[in-house]
Amino acid sequence: MLQLTKPLAFIDLETTGVNLGTDRIVEIAIVKILPDGSKTVKRKLINPEMPIPKANSDIHGITDDMVKDAPTFAQVARELKQVLDGCDLAGYNSNRFDIPLLVEEFLRVGVDFDMKGRKLIDVQNIFHKMEQRTLSAAYKFYCNKVLDGAHSAEADAAATHEVLLAQVARYPELGTTIDTINKVIGEEVIVDFARRFVMDNGIEVFNFGKYKGKSVAEVLKAEPQYYDWMMKGDFPQHTKQKLTEIFTRSKLLKKV
């Protein structure tokens, strides 16, 4: 049985696309598991304030007409933040998509969604480490069930929770806590969710462009105009937030 010391929120998003900087949420489902094993579910359709491409509607079944009267993210942001306060976060491919995009949405509307102290567990990482399949295959493999309603946010989030419970039961070496699971599969050290920066020997380095592999702080100290270029560019808000933190820290170190 999965042992929790604080609530674990399984998140699944349906969106207008996969670009963290420009796409928007059209549906969010949160399956929140409390340490005593009880569960609450929150699901909302969200007006993305932009057209939903047909290719994406064909996948998740959500159309412009379905969300035209739904609240915008700005209108539900504080409610969602309250639901997620004090929670660790989980999902399927959530470290690379769902959580980064959710953080972007909070940043866009000026709501402080603090990630500090939250543990992240991506069920896809466990699955790929152990079996390397898709969510529907994972559900069939671990739970011996067919995933009805795939690409429905609530169905996917709920199925992801069931898969994690089955993984914990199947692989004793994972342990029963988020800490032991992450230790076995190798917990990701994330700088920014878009991975424009990565950690190398304990320091943030660029993961793109002409300074790839170079210390972000050292580049910014030598070329502060590069900071301005990135802040004006089409980079995700979370990337700009982390860039500013590093830039501010590098300026303080320079004064010392």
Image (spheres, grey):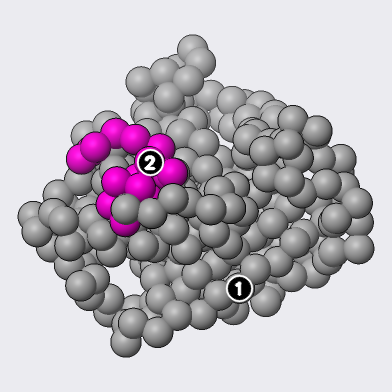
Disc marking residue 137: 2
* Amino acid residing under circle 1: Lys
Residue drawn 59% across the image and 42% down it? 240
Q: Position of residue 230 (x, y in %)?
A: 63, 30
Q: Position of residue 169 (x, y in %)?
A: 17, 62
Residue drawn 68% across the image and 74% down it? 78
Compared to 18, does 1 lie above or below? below
Q: Is residue 228 left or right of residue 127?
A: right
Q: Is residue 169 visible?
A: yes
The answer to which of 109 and 180 lies nearer the viewer is 180
Q: Name the residue beneath numbered marker 1.
A: 42
Task: Magenta stretch: give its range.
Answer: 129-143
* Label 1 vs label 2, nearer the camera: 2
Queried whether the magenta region covers residue 63, the answer comes back as no
Q: Is residue 77 left or right of residue 210?
A: right
Queried whether the magenta region covers residue 137, the answer comes back as yes
Compared to 189, does 207 lie above or below? above
